[in-house]
Image: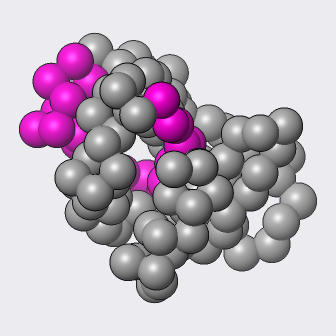
């Protein structure tokens, strides 16, 4: 299954959560609201085999020119080893209360990545 197809199916499953789908140089990224990020990630694991969290990081979009989007994001790069498909999920984090649910229950190794992201961006 192609990454764009996964993105489309995630938008169908979570129409209120998906803000944008972008493709750049063969890489597909979804921009989501952060409130249900765990639900989306659990769904991606169960339905598309995206069991491997390749990386997790925070992004400060201080120079973002798109109106209505917040400054900070948490980015999850997911991969399916047996199926060889991947997707990037970007969770927009609110400016007033910048917080997002932990994904450690899904990927225990994310503990260190989340701590590093918090130390970098707060």
Name the spot of residue 65 as percent of width and height, x first.
88, 59
Name the spot of residue 19 as percent of width and height, x first.
60, 73
Q: Is residue 12 left or right of residue 51?
A: right
In which quarter of the view is residue 35 placed?
bottom left
Q: Which residues are magenta?
A: 84-110
Of 100 and 56, the residue lying toward us: 56
Total marks placed: 0
| Vertical relation: 2 (above or below) 52 | below
* Whether residue 57 can be seen here: yes
* Whether residue 56 can be seen here: no
Does the segment drawn in magenta span residue 60? no
Name the spot of residue 117 as percent of width and height, x first.
44, 25
Q: How is the image coloured?
A: one colour
Does the segment drawn in magenta span residue 90? yes
Q: Is residue 47 left or right of residue 66?
A: left
Say which residue appears at 38% left-offset and 78% top-offset. 13
Where is the C terminus found, in terms of image quarters?
A: top left
Of 71 and 20, the residue lying toward us: 20
| Vertical relation: 42 (above or below) 96 | above
């Amino acid at each position: 299954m192609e990454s764009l197809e996964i993105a489309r199916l995630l938008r169908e499953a979570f129409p209120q959560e998906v803000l944008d789908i972008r493709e750049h140089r063969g890489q597909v990224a979804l921009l989501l609201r952060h409130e249900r990020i765990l639900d989306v990630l659990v769904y991606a694991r169960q339905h598309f085999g995206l069991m491997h969290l390749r990386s997790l990081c925070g992004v400060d979009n201080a120079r973002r020119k798109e109106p209505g989007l917040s400054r900070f994001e948490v980015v999850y790069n997911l991969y399916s080893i047996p199926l060889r498909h991947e997707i990037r999920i970007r969770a927009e984090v609110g400016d007033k209360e910048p917080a997002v649910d932990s994904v450690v229950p899904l990927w225990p190794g994310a503990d260190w990545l989340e701590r590093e992201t918090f130390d970098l961006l707060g």
